[in-house]
Image (cartoon, rainbow, N blue to C red):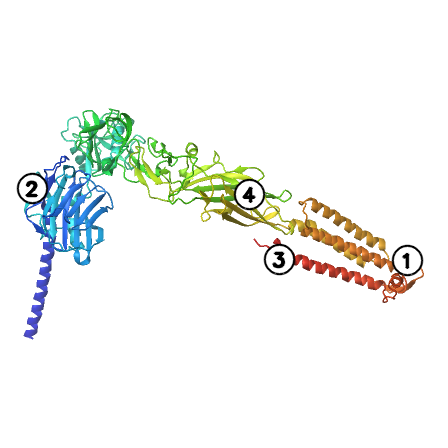
Amino acid sequence: MGQRSCNFLLVLFLLFAIIVFLLIDWTTGQRDTADHGSKTVRVLEFNMDRTQRDTTWMEYGEDVIIPDDYTLCLRFNLRVFRLLTALFYMLDKTDYDNFPISFEVYFEKIRTKYGGMGKFYPLPSNLATNKWYHYCQVRETSKGEGRVYLDGQQIIRENFTFKPDNAIRDTIIGQDEWMEKYSFSGQLSQVNIWGRVLPLEEISALASCEYDMEGDVMSWSGTWEEHGVEEKEVQLGDMCRSVSRGRLTVPIPLLHYHDAVRVCKGLRGTIAVPATRQEFLDEIAFFHDVVGCERQWGGANDEAEEDVWYNPFTGEKLAPSELDFKELNPDGGIYQNCMLLRYQGQGLLDTDCMKPSCTACHTRAGSTWTLKGICEEEERMYYFDLVEVPMTFQGYGEYMVQKLGDTWVWYNTITNTTMATLPVQELNYPIGRLAWDLKAPVCGQEKGHRILTLSPCHVGEFTCTDGSCIPFSSRCDLKFDCGDKTDESFCDIVNFPDDYRSKLPPRPVTDLPLPISINISIDTVNIDTTTMLLSTSYNLRMTWHDNRLTYNNLKALTRLNTVSQEQVDELWRPQIGFINTDDIQNTVVDQDAVTTILRRDTSCIPDLSNPYEVEIYRGDTNPVSTTRKYSTVFTCNFDLVLYPFDIQICFMQLQILSASSEYLIFNATDSAVQYLGQKLLVEYGIGEIDLQVDNSAQYSEMKVQVELIRRYGYAMLNIYIPSLTLLIISYVTLFFRPSIFEVRVMTALTALLVLATLFTQVSASLPKTSYFKMVDIWLLFCIVLIFFIIIFHTIIDFHVDYGDSQTQSWVKKSPGSSAITPIQVLSADGGISSLLKSITGKMPPNLNLRFYITLSRYTMSLIFVVFNISYWGTLAKDSGLVYYY
C-alpha cells in the first residue's frame, strides 16, 4: 500500500513538473515575442539625400565561403530607384565577374544570381519608395532549386544545376563597380546568411518581425566596414509596421472651407469630424503653437439641411448630439454652416464657411502619385511619394515636385534641371490636371503650356481635373461622374498611327488574307412570286481586326465603345457588294451606320504620357465592328413545277469588293445569319436559313440561303376545293336520268366552263413558264375528266330511245312506289351495235344502256383514284406538302 502511494505521488510530481515547464516555456515565448517587437535593430543609411555617389558603401570584414545550400536574407528600404540599384554582391576574390551571388533592385523587377545561375524576374507588383521590404534568397543544391521570398511570400522558384561553389568571396553592399549612377540610396538592415535552407515558417517569422535571428555564415552583428553611411537604431516592429504605411497628416494653410475640402480630396485624404473629446484634442494638437492656425476646419457642414451635419468625404449625416460641440453650440443658424476647431475652445463650433482656416488633411502614407503627360522610357520616372512637411512629391526616379516661394517646380534632382513650373492660381496646389509652363523639352515640346496630371489615383481609377478619383469604368460612359464633368472629355477611341492609310486594308502579321466576319440579322422578308423578287430588311454587321490601330478605354459594354463619325471617316472599312440585285448596291458606312470596338482582350497598357489618362488596347486582338440596316431586293429564280406546294431556295449573294481573296476573305467560322421576323408570311413560310462561304474565287463570296415553303392553304381553298367540287358535280351527272340529256350535258359543260375560267385566272397570277406546274396538271386533269364525262353522256344518249322503232323496253321501278315506269332503249342489234357491225364485220356483245352507265361511273372513278394517288404521292415526296417547320 505504501509503495502504491509513493508511485502515485511520483506521477503527480512529474505531471506538475511538465505543466510548470510548459507554462515557463509559453511565458518565455510570449516575453521573447514582446521583446522582439520592441527590440532595436541597427539600420544603415545610404545617400538619404538622393544624391548619386560612388563613395557610399559597406563591406563585410571577413572573407566568406558559401556552402552549397544557403539562405541569404536582408531588409531594405529604397529612397529612390536608379536605373539599376546595386544592393548586395558576393564576389569571387580572384575574379569579380566569375559567378557572383547578387541582388539588384529595379522598379518593376529584380535580378537575382545564386552563383552561376540567375536572371531578371518580374515582381507581382511594382516596388515603392520609403517602404521596408524583406528579401530572402535560397539555394538548395540537393534539389537543384533556387527560390526567392519577398515579405515572406515565395515569388520565384527555378530549377538549376548548380556547380560546387568553393569560391572565397568579398561582400559588397551599395555599389556596382563603383559606378555612382547605380549607387544605393536608402536604408538597409538585418543582412544574414545561414549555411542551411531555412524553412518557410522561419522565413515568414523573420519577414513579419516575430524574431531576429543572426546568420551563421554571415551575421548583421558581425564586423562591417562602413564607408560614407550613417547608422541609427530602429525598433524592429517599426519596420513591419511600415508595410501598411499608416496615416500621413498634411497641413494645409489658410483656405475657405470648400477649397480645403477640394484640396484634401485631391490628396485622397479626409478632414476629421471629432465625435469625442479625445478626438477633438488629438486634432487641435496638430496645429498647437502654429502661428496663424488658431482656426482649424472640421470635416462637416450643415449647408444643405440645418442641424444635419454632412461629411463630404464619407457621405455620413450626423446630428449635433453625435459630435463634440461646445456647450450651447452650434448657434450660428443658417449664417454659420461649417465646423470649426479652436485650440482655446472646449469643443466644436460652427462658423462662416468663407473665413480662412487651416486644415489637417489625413491621408494614407505611402500612396503612389503619378505624373501623367510626360514621356519617359523608364516607368519609375512617372511615380512620386508624398512627403507631408513641407508638402513635397519625391520621385521614385530622378524627379521631384516642390514648392519654391509661391511657385511649384518640377525638376530633375540629378541634373538639377527645372522641367516645368506651375503658375500661381486660385488654389496653388499641383494636384490634378493643370497647365504647366515648360522650361525643358517634354515629349518633343520645347516651351509653352502643357497639360500635366499629378494624381494619387490607383490603377483602375480616373483622375478628375480637381484630383479626385472615380472608377475608370466611369470614364466616357455617357454620364458625368466627376464634379467638374471632365470624365466625359477627350473620349476619342481610335488612335491612328502617322502612316495610317484608310484606302489600304490591314495586313495580318502572318501575311495571310484578312478574315472578315459577317453577321446578318434578317428582320423582314417579302416575296413577290410574279416578279420573282426577294425583298429583305436586315442588319448587317461586318467585323475585322486592324492591327495598325490601338484603342482607348474600351468598356465591357460594347455600345459604350462607339466610334465617332469623324474617326469613322478616317477608318479603313471593307466594302461588300450585293450581287444578285437589279442595280449596283453595296455596303456603306454613313450616319446610319454604328461603328464600335469589341473588347475581346481585357489586357491593356496605361498610357502615362497622356495627361487625360487612357488605357491602351491592341488592335489585333480587339476587332472593329460596323452595323447598318439595309433594305435590299434580291432576284430569285423560282422553280414553280410543284406550285402551289413548291419549296423555293433564294439567295442573298455578297461579295468582297475592297480587294481580291489574296488579301480579304470571309470568315466562315465567325460568320452567322439569323432570322428574327415572323416565320409564317402571307404566301410562304420561312424554312431553314443557312450561310455558305466560297473563298476560292477571285473575290471571296458568301451566300445566305433562305428556304421558302409555300403556304398552300390559299390554293386549296381557291383552286383545289372548288375544282374538286366542280369535278364531283360533273361526276354526279352520271347518276342523272339518262332521258334528261340536256341537263346532264349542261351541268358538265357549265363545270367545264368554270374550270377553264379558273385555270385562266390561276395562270395569269403566276409567271409564264415553259413547263407545266402541278396546279396546271390538276386543272387540266379536271377539265379532261369532265370532257370524258361529256363523252360518256353522249354515248349513253345514243342508247336512249326517244320514240323510233328500234327500241326495247327497260323497266324501272320508281323509288318509294310500286308503280313500274317503262322506258325505251335501243336494241342490241341497232344503233351503236349496228354501226360497230358495219365497221368491224362482226356483231359486238350485247351492249345496253345499263352497261354504258355502269362503265362510265367506274371508269371515271378509277381514273380519278389512279391520278390522285400519283399526283399526291409525287407531292408528298418532293414538295412542301408534308414539310414541317
Look at label 1 and name its amino acid: Tyr
Separation of residues labelled 4 and 2 (CA atoms): 86 Å
Residue 242 in percent (x, y) is at 17, 42
Q: Secondary structure at mark 2?
A: strand
Residue under numbered circle 1? 802
Q: Nearer the viewer, mark 3 or mark 1?
A: 3
**Mark nearer the viewer, 4 or 3:** 3
Q: Please identify the quarter of the rendering in which residue 288 is found.
A: top left
Task: Return the residue at label 3.
Answer: 877
Q: Can you tell which mark lies on residue 360?
A: none
Q: Does 661 sit left or right of 547 as displayed? A: right
Within 10 angstroms of label 1, few (less than 14), some, or many (20 or more) residues? Answer: some
Answer with mark 1 or mark 4, whichever residue precedes in sequence.
Answer: 4
In the image, which is nearer the foreground, mark 4 or mark 2? 2
Q: Secondary structure at mark 4?
A: strand
Query: Which residue in the protein does label 2 denote?
Result: 226
**Secondary structure of residue under mark 3:** helix
Q: Residues within 10 Å of mark 4 (few under 14, many from 20)?
A: some
Residue at 41% x, 45% y is 512
Q: Position of residue 199 (x, y in %)?
A: 17, 55
Query: Label 1's element?
Result: loop
Q: Give the CA distance from mark 3 to mark 1.
A: 52 Å
Would you place residue 248 above or below residue 10 in this image? Answer: above
Whichever of labels 3 and 1 marks the residue nearer the N terminus, that label is 1
